[in-house]
Amino acid sequence: MADHVILFQPVYAAEGNITELFLKDPHTEPCHDPRTIHSVRCALAKTYVTDLITQGKIIKRTFHRSAPVPFYLPDGRVYVPLKMREQRINRDSCYGFVEINAVKALRETKHNTDLLLTTGHRISIFTSITPHVRSFTLS
């Protein structure tokens, strides 16, 4: 399944703070993983033997960025962090990650920004379009 993940975002559910996964297949509904966004990100990286800590340090140092930063996998996929929800409590995960080639468009609306995926899914993200354009340009 790791080869097919194009977006993963934190969501609140009856089970608690879980992760919603969107896959490449446009006919597949998003699925839920009971792990936190951090655990899912680490598991995805581990599948490809990718050291996220070292990679993050290099990206931060090279591009003078602070966390969260994009990450990339050896197969060429690059995941960009986007603010997917409002923070409810201190240290709550609010950033998800989208694979850059799965983005069809970003559209600013009255209250937030819509992320349109190549699969046809539309996801609301919770900041203006400007920081997201910067993230895509960096990636």
Image (cartoon, helix red, strand yellow):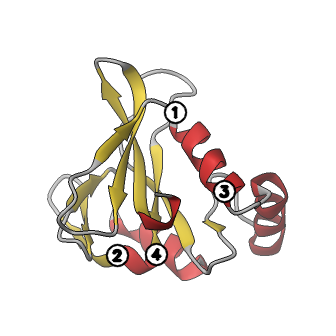
Which one is closest to the eye, mark 2 or mark 1?
A: 1
**Residue in the image at 83% along x and 67% along y:** 58
CB atoms at circles 2 and 4 under 8 Å apart?
Answer: yes
Quadrant of the image occupied by residue 74: bottom right
The amino acid sitting under disc 3 is: Thr
Do the numbered discs 3 and 1 sit on residues whose CB atoms are within 8 Å?
A: no
| Contact, mark 2 vs mark 3 (Cβ under 8 Å) | no
Q: Earlier in the sequence, mark 2 or mark 1?
A: 1
Which residue was labeled with disc 4?
Answer: 100
Question: Spatial distance from mark 4 to mark 1, Cα to Cα?
Answer: 21 Å
Query: Which kind of residue does numbered mark 4 sit on?
Result: Ile
Q: Considering the numbered disc 3 on the image, is that residue within a helix, a strand or a loop?
A: helix
Instruction: For marks 2 and 1, give the CA distance.
Output: 23 Å
Element at label 1? loop
Tag 4–tag 1 contact (CB < 8 Å): no
Residue with the mark numbered 1: 36
Mark 3 vs mark 1, CA separation in Å: 17 Å
x 60%, y 38%: residue: 39
Q: Which residue is mark 2?
A: 103
Q: Nearer the viewer, residue 4 or 99?
A: 4
The mark that comes first in sequence, 2 or 3, is 3
